[in-house]
Image (tube, helix red, strand yellow):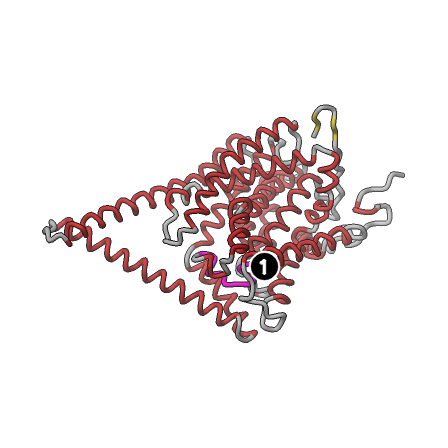
Amino acid sequence: MTDAGLTVALPPPAEPDGAPRLATLDILRGIAILAILFMNINGMGGSLHAFFGDVRHYGWTAADQASWWVREVLANGTARALLEMLFGAGMVILTDRAATHMSKWQVFRSYAWRNIVLIAFGLIHVFVLLWPGDILHTYGIAALVAALFRRFRPRWLIVFGLLLSMFMLLGGGAGITVSRMQERQATELRVKRDAGQSLTTIEAKTLGNADKAAGERAKRKAEDKQRVVAEDQARQGTAGQWVRSAWDSFFFIQAMFLEILFVWEAASTMLIGAALYKLGILQGARSMSFYAKLTVISYATALPLRALFAYDLTRFDGSTGLSQATSELARLAMTVGHVGLINMALASVVGSRLLKPFEAAGRTALTIYILQTLICVFILYPPWGLGLYGQQGWASFMLTALAVNALLLWWANWWVKDHAIAPVEWAWRSAVAGRRLPFRLRAHEGRGGEPVAA
């Protein structure tokens, strides 16, 4: 990136399997993978079901509320979106590289195998490491869909990505609009009935359907509360109950067909990420003025929408209004704003030095993701560990995530000094390549994996 004569060079290290790396993308990935713990930790140290209901279940002191508001407005969903965008960029990098010596079918088959192995790793993460909120298998499935569009021009990638996102927006908006119209109509009919006025057959049927729908909503709400209570009891019980609860949560997600929505979201955002990479936006190839405008416009769009959505959630009446319909648009805009802000920082000497440690986190992102689970699910919160499940509120969760991430960031920078690849990345890429990849740095490589000049 250059601006006013300022140039910041971030040379990429080489990977053992020959895959190229871009330091700017690694920094973005490192920030995103560490940020993901702030999104996951409440489901690791508290009820996962409660996150889809009343967030006060985790604690609602003044500090908890402040922490939740910052998390909800500035961060919630954006770490996931940034990882999805980077996954789309990686898809372009890997398939373009493979296309130089493979046919179109071979490129897709090779990329598909890479993601099939990732899906397997994700399922191990779910059933062995006991994290039902795993994203690896979801991204593996979504990437198989996104790969079908990989050769499209940037504008068409953005169009298809936004169209997929808009389906959720329009669907949510239409559903909310219809539901509100029905509620208003039912309220008017109840007033008419209570005033002693007779209802027509159609009006009586309409009111009966509305009362039935209200009863079903009340029943679902009661069932949700029961699930939270049952999960709390199980995860504060025996080790066997902890394991069973994690599996039950995963199967509940599948039974509610939420996986389809997760894959849909991931695939659409991957397409947008692929376009942003092809346009040079993700990797910092644009000017400082471009990123300044991008950041201002994105934040100006996202901040009011996300603040409104957060406010609607804190009404705790089960109705989020039309802000629910615009939540996906706001998530994407906020994420693009973060991309612009980080690239602006990387355009300065001070900013690039401050963000440089996150490059190591990006190179070891998959291992950090698994280590986050091991630390939280196997040490901090389970009955066989410190047993802190249910003992923390939002503020404490955020501070715990900060401490864990600080430790992992230090580990990542220590690890890359002497190793060519992180442990989980090594296992995944070795399985994909069908051979044992080099683990430590070769003799002719220096610290951080960068070649030493002859």
Say whether residue 434 is visible. no
Q: Residues within 10 Å of mark 1 (few under 14, many from 20)?
A: some
Residue segment shown in magenta: 42-52
248 and 347: which is toward the camera: 347
Left or right, 284 with respect to 136, comes to: right
* Circle 1: residue type: Ser
Q: Is residue 216 above or below residue 164?
A: below
* Residue 418 x/y as whole percent: 81, 52
Q: Residue furthest right?
A: 454
Residue 273 colored in magenta in the image: no
Q: Residue at x 59, y 59 (%)?
A: 396
- State the image quarter where residue 342 is shown: top right
**Where the C terminus falls, by quadrant?**
top right
* SS category of the residue bearing label 1: helix
Q: Residue furthest bottom?
A: 238
* Residue 84 x/y as whole percent: 56, 45
Q: Residue furthest front?
A: 62
Residue 48 colored in magenta in the image: yes
